[in-house]
Each structure stands twice: as C-alpha cells, then as structure tokens.
Image: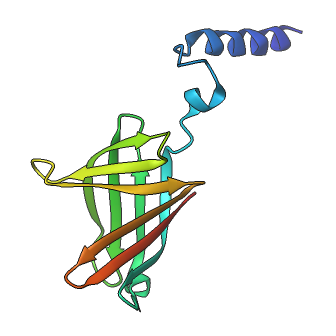
Amino acid sequence: MKLKYSICALFAALLFALPSCGNGSLKDITKPYLGAYECESAKLGEKEYMDEFSYIRLELNLDETFSLYYCPKGGQKREETGTYVYDEKEETLQLSAGENGEFKRKFPLKKGVLTVSLTIGNKILLMKFEQK
C-alpha cells in the first residue's frame, strides 16, 4: 500500500514540477522534434554517398543546440555543432553553424523526417534524416 501511495506522490510531484507551457498540451511539454536523427540517404546529384560513411547522425538538444556526428568509413569520428530554431507552424528547422553563424538555412521537418537540400556548385545535395 505504501508503494502505491509513493508512486502516486511521485507522479503528482512530477506534474507540479513541470513548467507551465502554452496551453499545457502534451505536445508543448514533450517537444517531439527533440532527439536523434539518422541519415538514411545522402545524394549529391545522382551519386549516393551513405555507403562511404559508417553513420551520420543529428541530435537536437533541449537547449536549442545541435550536434552532427559522422564517421567516414576507415576514418575518425567527427562532430559539428551549432544552434537551431524549430518553427512549429511552418514545420521547419533552421540550423545555424560556424563561428559567426555564417551558415544559416531552413529545412522542412515533418513527421520525424528532416530533408536537407543544398546547392553545391551546379549539383544538389539531398539528405534525409529520420528520427529514431
């Protein structure tokens, strides 16, 4: 019986400890876009480059920072960092990186899929990240 009351008290304490967010909906509290995304496809023009990497991962953190982790096959692990802003109405993720935020682009983030599209020279880099 004590265990039952302890569990109820724990849940009540957690609910009261959570900050009041917007209208208090679960979506406001959980921020479903947060977490890890795995790159499933990375094409430059018609050439697929994922087979040249062990992995490419993007992590969106609660403090509006991101980390991009990648490891070329036979190479060393690398990490790039920056900041992001998620726009719930537009369903876009704006990534900013570089010393003075010189890289700043918006990409669609819908239903757990982030689509990165950049022009490099006369080709398009198209990357698809899926939330894990």
Is 107 positioned to the left or the right of 30 in the image?
left
Nearest the viewer among 55 and 131 is 131
- Give coordinates of residue 107: x percent, y percent: 39, 57
Residue 13 image point, x, y percent: 64, 10
Q: What residue do we see at 84% from left, 13% from top?
A: 4
Residue 105 or 70: which is nearer the viewer? Answer: 105
Return the residue found at the far bottom.
47
Report whether 20 appears left or right of 84: right
Spot occupied by residue 3 in the image (x, y as percentages of width and height): 82, 14
Image-quadrant location for residue 48 = bottom left
User: Which quadrant of the structure image shows residue 20?
Assistant: top right
Instruction: Spot the residue most to the left.
Output: 100
Quarter of the image that includes the C terminus? bottom right
In the image, residue 7 above or below residue 77: above
Left or right placement of residue 82 versus residue 61 in this view: left
- Residue 94 is situated, as x and y percent measured from the top left of the image, at 33, 49
What residue is rendered at 43% in x and 49% in y? 92
Q: Is residue 12 above or below residue 28?
A: above
Residue drawn at x 70%, y 10% as measured from the top left = 12
| In this view, 27 is above or below 78 | above
